Image (cartoon, grey):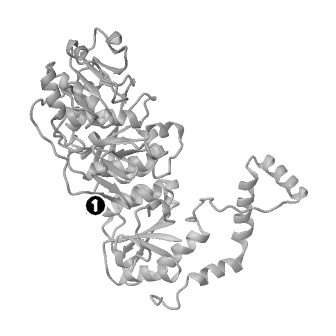
Amino acid sequence: MKVYFFTNEYDETTKQIAASLRSSGILILSNQEHFSSISHPADMSLEKMQAVIIYGAEAASAGYLVAAALSQKKPVLYVLPKGNLFPEELKFLQGNRQLAQLFLVKFVQPGKATEAIYDFLELLETGELRQENVSIKFTFRLSPRLERYLNWRSVKEKISKADWLRNFLIEEVIEKDEAWKNYIKNKNKPDQEGNS
Amino acid sequence: MVNIVTNNKSVTIIIASSWPAITQNQLTQAIPEISLLAKTKLVNFSYDHKLPAAPQWQSFVDLIRAEAADPIGGLVVLADLTLALYLSNVISFGWLQPTLPIIFTTGVEDLFFKKKLIKAGGVKANLINAVQLATLAKPQTVILDGFHLIAPSKAGFDQRNETNTLVSLDNQYIGKVDFGISFSEETLPVQVGWPHHNLFETQIQVINQGPFAAEVISAQAKGLIFVRHEPQVALAESFLASLEVPYVIFQPTLLLEKTSTPIVNYLTWHCLVVKFAWLLAATDNQTLITNGLLNPYLGEIMGS
């Protein structure tokens, strides 16, 4: 997964955010070169990121990035130091259900951002912030019986067979699989806060 | 390149198209993210597409100047590719020194077909970037298409790329979009001198050069543009000397011979048409027009 990390700060919290991402196997591209774990070739655009993380109290410098990311359906985590108010410019998002689903704000104490990052990554995998971008092609063969069932179900529910199967996998398999949820949670958890 | 930051200003969005007018509410529903960037006002400018040199050029300049009189941060004009090329040149010449950023962008048709709405090259990304740019750029007229900021006088279609995008034909860009918008530190050169007006001749006739060119000249034409596709086929100098209205020959390829006739291969097609109409509105003197075409008001002369 590739994440764009935008910040104007260089402190314990931002270092911790970058370390948390790296320890989760996330590739980082950042406006601050020292946080990037991938180079920034000419064709590396926002379109190629799976999510955006913004840190800092200067909402004015991030509004454009939030708008650009949400317009491409990229989930956004906005991390703010505790004590700051929710940026006025972004309050509009709270009233827009469609955009709010992709936008998460977390207020953190200095140097205590790790939990927010892991929560976000977990949500990307399992929760509302997951992307609905269907891009992986997977071919498998069906028996006539399975095909008959899918045809019948597709007509009955007025959706495509592929959509019905995807929904079934998410709602009836993944969301009910506690072993999988534990696996994702443990995979994203650090040994200790800030220790990556 | 200098990174720029966001702030929240008012931006007027002008949709110039032959499509039905849309409302502010429809635009906000289609692209709600714009609300994060600026307070916007929407103006529809219905365009009939009789190009080139449509009578609406004049009224478009008037509209832009009227909207710019409001206390706003900048203007965004959304149009299709061809109209954006013409109208951005119209504003570049018709208002040589604008007092605010005027950002042309493309993809208006996507609003109606609802396709490409979430792709970087589509109208959604273009409009978000354009609104952002309008709140921050220097007072100048630019085209934003995809990832590029282009001087209107240098913009043209990318012949090598199958995607329908605009490029700078001299490969020099004003800035780029890349996780934010960054500008080259250079400002577009503007040379104010004769003529300094916002009028455009509407009676321009475009003639594809051929053996019957003389037979198709309209009696109403106030200026002629001959398009010369094959350099070796020249119009007779005696024929050109007999013309009663100013003319120019557009030749997109290299000149093969020296000539005293006004052959233009140093301007883009859209820039030439607009600049010729602009010069014609000031004079019908062939020498002044030939010299005016060579004068780099906006740095538009390519290969110089």
Q: Residue at x 42, y 71 (%)?
A: A29
Q: Is residue B67 visible?
A: no
Instruction: Report helix, strand or loop for mark 1.
Output: loop
Q: Disc 1 designates what residue?
A: B5
Tell how many labels.
1
Q: Nearer the viewer, residue A142 or A177?
A: A142
Whether residue B122 sits left or right of residue B267 in the image: it is right
Whole-percent x, y for residue A112 in the image = 41, 83
Q: Residue at x 49, y 40 (%)?
A: B110
Q: Residue at x 41, y 66 (%)?
A: A41
Residue found at the very far left of the displayed protein: B193
Would you identify the image quadrant in which residue B230 lies? top left
Whole-percent x, y for residue B25 in the image = 44, 40
Q: Nearer the viewer, residue B245 or B177?
A: B245
Q: Nearer the viewer, residue B146 or B13?
A: B146
Would you identify the image quadrant in which residue A134 lies? bottom right
Amino acid identity at mark 1: Val
Whole-percent x, y for residue B166 in the image = 38, 44
Q: Is residue A2 visible?
A: yes
The image shows residue A143, relative to residue B111, as above or below, that is below
Q: Residue at x 85, y 55 (%)?
A: A147
Whole-percent x, y for residue B38 in the image = 32, 50
Position of the N terminus of chain A, as image quadrant, is: bottom right
- Using the image, name the chain to which the residue with label 1 belongs: B
Would you identify the image quadrant in which residue B69 lies? top left
Residue found at the very far right of the displayed protein: A145
Whether residue A57 sits left or right of residue A158 in the image: it is left
Label 1, residues with CA under 10 Å away: few <14, some 14-19, many ≥20: some
The image shows residue B222, relative to residue A90, as above or below, that is above
